Image (tube, coloured by chain):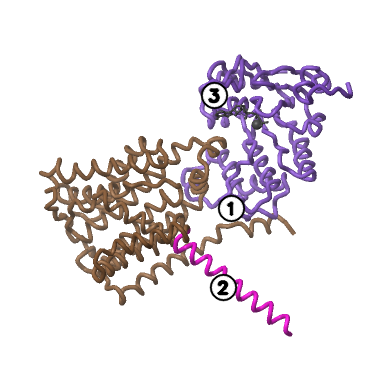
């Protein structure tokens, strides 16, 4: 009964094909959103979803709540913009510069912040974000044009023309799927098990012989690089950047998105990202001071839906399948 | 017989309370060393000092001939010291299988490429074989894909021991492995310990002396942070000082 094959069969994660199936579903979902929301907004939302995914890796999977993830988004934005103005107008090279820039900043600051936990971790990240905001907004005003903002120097390259909304949509979708794929593999790998166990009990992980510092540092750096990736996509897509992209207040956005969707669940981060953006867009046009609603929603999540949308769906699915099996059992009894 | 793990005048103060007081403790190769003593006598604190959870106020810890007093826990584990906790400590949010992947994978990372480490599936064959034999050792095959929080306390204890064993220790420290288990589960854990004890030196804290007296080669007794008696179990348990602190004044046997 418990042969090795049986045991292996029962072990999650499921087959490899499942990742690709999920990627197709995600792609279909965003394509289906186009008629509802207009293509340019869907593209915008997908970039935000990449950002939310980067935050989910750090918070949802490793359990480290940061109030400074926007720093890495902003670093990606400004590094790619400045690169395009001063070095090369090639969009792919600008992206590379942005991602590298964010990764380097995350790797450097990670050496400090990753040693901290909980409130000190969250607040130190916020402090660095604040510093980054001042550097961009005031100190280096000559280069960044401060509050006035600055246009990117990225130019179309071959078929890569970001003013073409179809191309922009496909390009961003590609990177969203790429991010989703990488994170799926990463979080299911042995490395993923280590970071999830760090979330539950870091001290215990040390007693398995792991130097948890390096795993936390690697995760922080990957998370920063992915936030930077989202930033470079903003540069290419929006083509005009300002310090709002690095404003510390925006840190509530990925936090909300991931909480709404369900922390530690990649579909949750994407669903939460879209839902948050839809609410922000539509509520803010129809309801004055829509933040009230957002705050109320957060309370509901914290008190009743700890697992966010993903947990809600799971509970719902459980209830439905219970009902069905009950009905089947009842039907069987009557025969 | 060589000393694997020794302490020299080891002391731990907790704001005035001397939990461990000038202790010279040793675990020798090929032996099972038992540690008993009344509640609050400092047994767990001693293990915490040995494994690096606490740094001592005074004194030193040597492991395999090197001074490890300032060596962090994960390095001690890498050197071959594994432990379990008085209150079972496994990863409740992971599956049983993932718990075992976590403890087994470290031995694969040296040979394997980074790509494998970051992107390999935890079902890959060489990882799976190790985890499978861990599962078989403790008889948890049917629970492999269960989330660990669903396990009974006894099964969690078995899993925790399996995890410690998969770290391939040369010294294993068990802190009250039988506490909170049913008689049946106690039988299982004891026979597991018999099965594997030849592979390493074992240090074991236990209140249920009768269950381990057969197992133990040397027995140490702690009281008020000091080791008050040590030697062969038969002798130690007849020592008047030990009988007094453990059973009060009554005298029987011996
Ligand atoms: N982290 C700590 N901070 C302060 N006091 C502590 C700490 N850990 C242990 N103590 C105290 O040190 C003393 C020894 O505790 P310890 O846990 O080592 O006893 P023990 O022999 O393991 O007892 P038991 O049989 O109940 O497990 C106790 O008085 C305890 O309250
Ligand atoms: Mg104890």
Q: Residue sitting at 26 percent across and 65 percent down?
A: A168
Q: Position of residue B160 (x, y in %)?
A: 65, 41
Q: Secondary structure at mark 2?
A: helix
Colour for chain A in the figure: brown
**Residue furthest toward the right?**
B253
Near mark 1 (Cα within 10 A), the count class, few <14, some 14-19 or many ≥20, is: many
> Which circle, 2 or 1, is nearer the viewer?
2
> Which residue does the numbered mark 1 point to in the structure image?
B123
Q: Chief secondary structure of the magenta span?
A: helix
Q: Quadrant of residue A273?
A: bottom left
Q: Position of residue A84 (x, y in %)?
A: 18, 51
Quadrant location of ligand 1? top right
> CA separation, marks 1 and 3?
45 Å
Q: Which residues are magenta?
A: A307-335
Q: Is mark 3 within 8 Å of ligand 1?
A: yes
| Foreground pick, A30 / B211 | B211
> Which residue does the numbered mark 3 point to in the structure image?
B14
> Which residue does the numbered mark 2 point to in the structure image?
A320
**Residue furthest toward the front?**
B249
Chain identity of mark 1: B
């Amino acid at each position: 009964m418990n042969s090795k094959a049986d045991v292996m069969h029962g072990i999650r994660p499921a087959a490899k094909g499942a990742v690709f199936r999920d990627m197709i579903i995600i792609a279909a979902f965003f394509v289906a959103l186009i008629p509802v929301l207009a293509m340019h907004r869907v593209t915008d939302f997908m970039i935000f979803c990449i950002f939310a995914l980067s935050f989910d890796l750090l918070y949802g999977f490793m359990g480290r709540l940061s109030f400074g993830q926007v720093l890495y988004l902003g670093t990606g934005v400004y590094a790619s913009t400045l690169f395009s103005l001063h070095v090369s107008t090639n969009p792919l090279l600008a992206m590379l510069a942005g991602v590298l820039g964010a990764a380097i900043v995350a790797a450097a600051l990670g050496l400090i912040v990753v040693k901290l936990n909980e409130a000190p971790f969250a607040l130190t990240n916020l402090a660095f974000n604040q510093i980054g905001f001042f550097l961009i907004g005031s100190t280096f005003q000559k280069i960044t044009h401060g509050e006035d903002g600055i246009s990117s120097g990225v130019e179309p390259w071959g078929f890569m023309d970001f003013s073409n909304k179809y191309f922009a949509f496909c390009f961003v979708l590609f990177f969203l799927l790429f991010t989703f794929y990488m994170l799926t593999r990463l979080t299911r790998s042995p490395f993923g098990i280590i970071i999830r166990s760090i979330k539950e009990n870091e001290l215990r992980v040390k007693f398995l012989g792991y130097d948890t510092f390096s795993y936390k540092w690697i995760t922080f750096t990957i998370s920063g690089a992915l936030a930077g990736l989202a930033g470079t996509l903003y540069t290419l897509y929006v083509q005009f950047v300002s310090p709002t992209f690095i404003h510390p207040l925006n840190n509530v956005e990925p936090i909300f998105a991931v909480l709404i969707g369900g922390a530690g669940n990649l579909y949750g981060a994407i669903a939460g990202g879209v839902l948050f953006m839809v609410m922000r867009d539509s509520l803010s046009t129809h309801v004055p001071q829509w933040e009230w609603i957002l705050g109320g929603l957060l309370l509901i999540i914290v008190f009743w839906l700890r697992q966010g949308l993903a947990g809600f769906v799971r509970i719902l699915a459980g209830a439905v399948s219970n009902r069905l099996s009950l009905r089947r059992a009842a039907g069987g009894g009557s025969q | 017989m060589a000393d694997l793990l020794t302490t020299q005048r080891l002391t731990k103060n907790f704001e005035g309370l001397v939990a461990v007081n000038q202790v010279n403790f040793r675990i020798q190769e090929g032996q099972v060393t038992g540690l008993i003593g009344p509640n609050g006598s400092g047994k767990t604190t001693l293990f915490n000092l040995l494994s690096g959870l606490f740094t001592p106020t005074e004194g030193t810890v040597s492991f395999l001939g090197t001074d490890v007093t300032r060596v962090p826990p994960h390095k001690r584990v890498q050197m071959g010291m594994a432990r379990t906790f008085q209150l079972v400590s496994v990863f409740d949010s992971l599956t049983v299988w993932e718990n075992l992947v976590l403890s087994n994978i470290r031995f694969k990372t040296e040979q394997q490429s980074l790509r494998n480490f970051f992107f390999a599936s935890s079902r890959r064959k060489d990882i799976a074989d190790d985890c499978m034999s861990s599962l078989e050792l403790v008889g948890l095959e049917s629970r492999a894909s269960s989330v660990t929080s669903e396990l009974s306390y006894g099964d969690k204890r078995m899993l925790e021991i399996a995890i410690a064993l998969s770290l391939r220790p040369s010294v294993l420290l068990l802190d009250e492995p039988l506490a909170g288990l049913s008689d049946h589960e106690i039988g299982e854990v004891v026979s597991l310990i018999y099965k594997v004890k030849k592979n390493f030196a074992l240090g074991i804290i236990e209140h249920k002396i009768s269950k381990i007296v057969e197992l133990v080669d040397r027995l140490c007794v702690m009281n008020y942070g000091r080791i008050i008696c040590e030697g062969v179990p038969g002798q130690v348990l007849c020592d008047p000082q030990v009988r007094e602190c453990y059973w009060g004044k009554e005298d029987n046997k011996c």
